Structure formats: structure tokens, C-alpha cells
Amino acid sequence: MHFVPLVVVVLVFWILVFFLMFKAQGSSALDFFLGKRAPLPPNLGSWVDCGLDPSRGKIRQERWLLPEGQDDPSHLLLQVRFFDPTSGEVVEVLPQQRVKRGRSKSS
């Protein structure tokens, strides 16, 4: 029964070594087991035309943003707005959405 604390200490030691190994590689254990997060969109922060939305009859624009203060977040913010095709004025703005970033397993 006096071996239980020793086993716990040894397990904690090897778990710490495991996590430190990943940290030194610039990765994490979550990235190892679940895969790396999907890459950020190339047009991050700028409005992109998505064409005419047939259901609304308006031009759709969207932009992806990082949450404030996060460099590699688990989610992104999506903003969508619609323009009138004739006047070019913004006529509708949808509420901002949180979109979870997927993970991709590398082979």
C-alpha cells in the first residue's frame, strides 16, 4: 500500500515530461490527439463579396475576424452585410456569429 504515492508521483512526472515535450515543439497534446486547427482564412479582417444572394436580391459581403486578444482561437467571428445592387448602400446587417474552427488530422 505504500507504493501508491510512488506510482502517482511517477505518473505525474511522465505526464509533465509528455506535455513539456509538446510545448518545446511549439505544439500541444490536444493538437497531437485531435489534429491541428484549420488554417485562418487568407482574407482575415477584410470584406469579401460573395455575390448576389438570390433569396434577398441583395449583394452579400462577409468578413472573418479574430476574437479580441487571441492569436490562435478555437472560434472565429463572422460578420455579414447586404448591399442594394442599384444604390450600393448597406441595407441589412446580420448579427455577428461565432463559428468554431475545425481540426484537421495530418497523415
Image: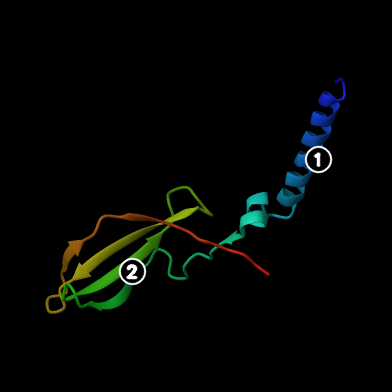
- Whole-percent x, y for residue 91 in the image: 15, 66
Looking at marks 2 and 1 on the same chain, the residue that comes earlier in the sequence is marked by: 1
Q: What residue lies at 16% left-to-right and 76% top-to-bottom?
A: 57
Q: Is residue 88 left or right of residue 2?
A: left
Q: What residue type is labelled 1?
A: Trp
Instruction: Left or right? Give the position of 106 relative to 76.
Output: right
Q: What element carries label 2?
A: loop
Give the CA distance from mark 2 to mark 1: 48 Å
Q: State the residue at coordinates (47%, 47%).
A: 69
Name the residue that disc number 2 marks. 47
Quadrant in which the C terminus appears: bottom right
- Residue lying at 83% horizontally and 34% vertically, measured from the top left: 10
> In the displayed image of the protein, which residue is found farthest to the top?
2
Q: Nearer the viewer, residue 41 or 104?
A: 104
Q: Is residue 82 shown left or right of residue 87?
A: right
Disc number placed over residue 68 in the picture, else none: none
Q: In this orientation, which residue lies closer to the viewer: 55 or 67?
A: 55
